[in-house]
Amino acid sequence: MLLGTGALLVALGTGVVFGRMSAGEHGRRDVPGDVAARVGSARASAERGSENAGTRRPSATPTAMTVGVPGEARVAAQPTELRWVAAGGGPAPEANPLSVEDDLALFAETLGPTEGLLLFAGGPGTRSVQVLEPETRGDALTTALAELFDPRGGRDARYRATRLALHGAATVTETLGAIGRALDEGDGPLTVFLAGHGGAGETPADATLLMWGDEALTPAALAETLDRAPRGRSVRVVVTSCYSGGFGELAFRGAKPALGPAADRCGFFAAPWDLQASGCDPDPNRAVHEGYAIHFLSALRGQDRDGHADRGALDLDRDGRISLREAHTRAVIASTSLDVPTTTSEVWLRAVAPTRGPERPVALPEVEAVVRAMAARTQLGGREAQVGVELARRHARMERLDAESARREEDEASAWHAAMGVVLSRWPVINDPWHPDFAATLADERDAVRRFLDEAPEVVAWRHARARLDETTRLLDEERVAAAPFERLARAREDLVLARRLHAAGGAGWAQYERLLACERGAP
């Protein structure tokens, strides 16, 4: 499976020390917890190209956006006005890679640092930012024991206090409270930016955003707060996590299609409700980060993701400004990761547009730009209709790799049980560093333990099983990244057809689509 922002970094360390964690303890629905933990180290995440398996950019000069001095508890001053609310981070320090802090800093700088409320992880002064270490640290033997008995993310990283000037922690309660306050006190359009890790669900409404303190924000909970917005107050929501398209249900009151369309709000999401996203990277070099947020926010500034001026290419409707929808379009086009970004207007189309029938032309320059760019990248220019065939081929390969990954996960788990058994049969407390005899056992039998871990057939077999699983995971990751441009092209072509059919149908469905487009085309 592709392990990442949905929950790759949700190797949270909440299980028993030196005890293999279950899927439930990791908050991951579709990947065994021990596997998620084992591959969820900061270094592994960075090497796979952020949060899941996006293509990493080549190294360049760091462009850190954070401010302040590490270790200071930087409490932000109260905003001069409330134009935005931003909250980010994961449920625990292991899920707070540096890139999330950088994205929040870039968002605040772009929209005006004194004009909103900023929440991150555990709040001001907490040591909750994960930063990748350039060199491996620690004792080799205890590292080997930890890999066997308690694999988890973050051991190849250090943690520092956030450099952001914050208004609070990114808990569900504080986030919804900040949004409610902004709705009550502000009077212009409100932008809500949510960054971090997502949880998958059986339906779009079941998707979640995992927040500090092991809490989960649901589309319904966010909709309940937003539904109280004053009539005429526009709200734009940006969510950068895996499965974030589940928050596309905000197109409806209560995030429930049966309740009808919501008024005056729209949203942009890094991935559909059933796909993962890239974007989480603990590498201190900002230039190698790759994810939806850095493309989207840089575009709002009239720049490409490297900071070069690019306003002419970004302003698709030539009105002299960069709209939120145009910035989203740049993220769709420029991303080199597995991201397949989506919007509330796309969710609306798939909910209400006729599946067949007459069509009427619609001007959608943003979608047309995606079609042109993805047709060129996939080398399907002039043959765009073949994208379905190509996607079917790639999906079949991913299904085969997924099945192979599942088999290898079982093999790895079986080999792990055997390896654990032979080690514990000789040193019964070696998996419990809190046991009174642990330190003496390690000191007295250190050489014997090291040789056994190096040579025991069961331990060697487990390492080989793990390597085979890692290789399958790598191949599946690469296939998902390679398939992403085809996914984007197919979705954009479908958007055009559905929009033309909805235009021909007219009525309330078309009128609401126009309102969603107007909201998405607003300025930040």
Image (tube, helix red, strand yellow):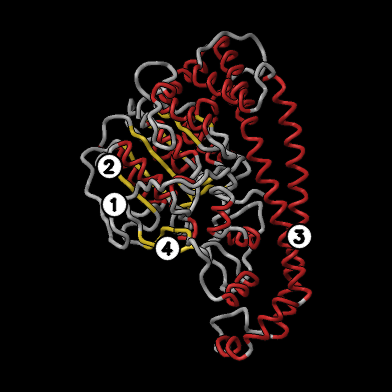
Q: Is residue 63 visible?
A: yes
The residue that mark 2 highlights is 113
Q: Position of residue 342 (x, y in %)?
A: 53, 31
Image position of 115 with respect to 435: above or below: above
User: On the picture, is 429 further left or further right than 335?
Assistant: right
Q: CA distance from mark 2 to mark 4?
A: 25 Å
The residue that mark 3 highlights is 410
Q: Position of residue 443 (x, y in %)?
A: 58, 88
Residue depicted at x 49% and y 38%: 292
User: Callout 4: helix, strand or loop?
Assistant: strand
Image position of 98 with respect to 160: above or below: above
> Quarter-wise, where is residue 130 in the image?
bottom left
Q: Position of residue 406 (x, y in %)?
A: 75, 53
Residue depicted at x 27% and y 42%: 113
The residue that mark 4 highlights is 159
The residue that mark 1 highlights is 165
Q: Residues within 10 Å of mark 3 (few under 14, many from 20)?
A: some
User: Callout 1: helix, strand or loop?
Assistant: loop
Compare marks 2 and 4 and give the one earlier in the sequence: 2
Q: Residues within 10 Å of mark 1 (few under 14, many from 20)?
A: many
Q: Residue furthest front?
A: 60
Image position of 455 with respect to 398: above or below: below
Compare marks 1 and 2 and give the one earlier in the sequence: 2
Q: CA distance from mark 1 to mark 2?
A: 9 Å
Asked whether disc 1 touches disc 2, contact meaning CB atoms under 8 Å apart, the reply is: yes
